[in-house]
Image (cartoon, grey):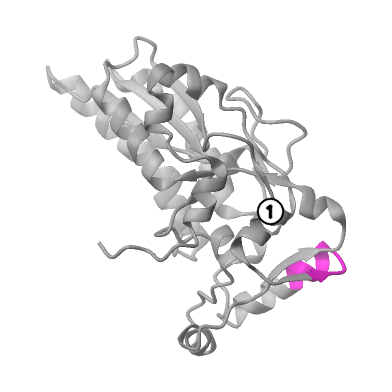
Amino acid sequence: TGVLDVERMWQINVAGTARVMEAVTEVNRTADDGIKQFIFPSSVSAYGPDLPAPATEESAFGAHTLPYAIHKKESDEVVQQRCTALRGCSVYILRPHIFAGASVENYLMGAFRGTPNGKGARAEQMRAAGKRLPCMLPRGQQYLDNKIQFIHVDDMARLIRHILQREPETQRLTVLNVAGRGEPLTFAKCIEIAHAKLVRVPGKWVMRQVLAFLWKQQISAIPPEALPYMTGEYIMNTDRLHRFLGPEYEHVIRYTVTDAFADSFKAATPA
């Protein structure tokens, strides 16, 4: 996500996914004991930023505006289209919600933490002084009431390990929405947990202009194209994940949505 050239991002994210699948196909064509499992980490963002109901794995994709989300949608579609060519390989598409945890850096966590993660001198000065940017939302109760989910990165790692350690599925493609246990959080509750200062602006247009200014000045690392994903509601139904893991569910997905988010505000433990 540190890549800013959109065409280069597409080549890495979408074309790169296709090349990897071509490589798996070739290995499995020529080797007796080839690759048995292929796990592709997609994203909730592929569904789009404003959903009328929790997305199931069959929900239509509606990603727009944010290049990261559009590329996740297109990469996900590439995997779906090409999975049958992988010759004896079980394919898993995991669609995680926003990653959380003390070590995680992404645009939404940056918004709640208020970290001036831009590459400019001003951002560096602010970080050195321990200054936080306020959390910004348009006026209107609906933006505070919007719900969001998180998945702890450790739980995502446990899920991938679980898949690799179990027998490959007999079906060619398995798609799973992935989020923490329990209920979603509202944006208002996230702001409270983060101890963030909230600034309300007159509307989405003004918020985008502020994001664009902070981005252009290299103060913030939040692209203005992320606006729809900061002002919409997009949560997922994870019943299929629960069934897939069965009695292992709480052993693999150990963090609730709330606990995963709260852990993001603890000091990261040095590796």
Location of residue 220 with respect to 82 vertically, above or below = below
Say whether residue 64 is left or right of residue 200.
Answer: left
The region drawn magenta spans 200-209
Describe the element under mark 1 as helix, strand or loop. helix
Location of residue 194 with respect to 165 vertically, above or below = below
Mark 1 = which residue? 189
Is 204 a magenta residue? yes
Location of residue 186 with respect to 224 vertically, above or below = above
Say whether residue 27 is left or right of residue 259.
Answer: left
| Residue 35 image point, x, y percent | 21, 25
| Residue 141 image point, x, y percent | 86, 54
Q: Residue at x 41, y 21 (%)?
A: 245
Is 201 a magenta residue? yes
| Residue 217 image point, x, y percent | 60, 83
Say whether residue 40 is left or right of residue 35.
Answer: right
Can I make out residue 142 in this image? yes
* Three-letter amino acid code of the residue under disc 1: Lys
Q: Residue at x 46, y 41 (%)?
A: 255
Closest to the observer, 146 or 228? 146
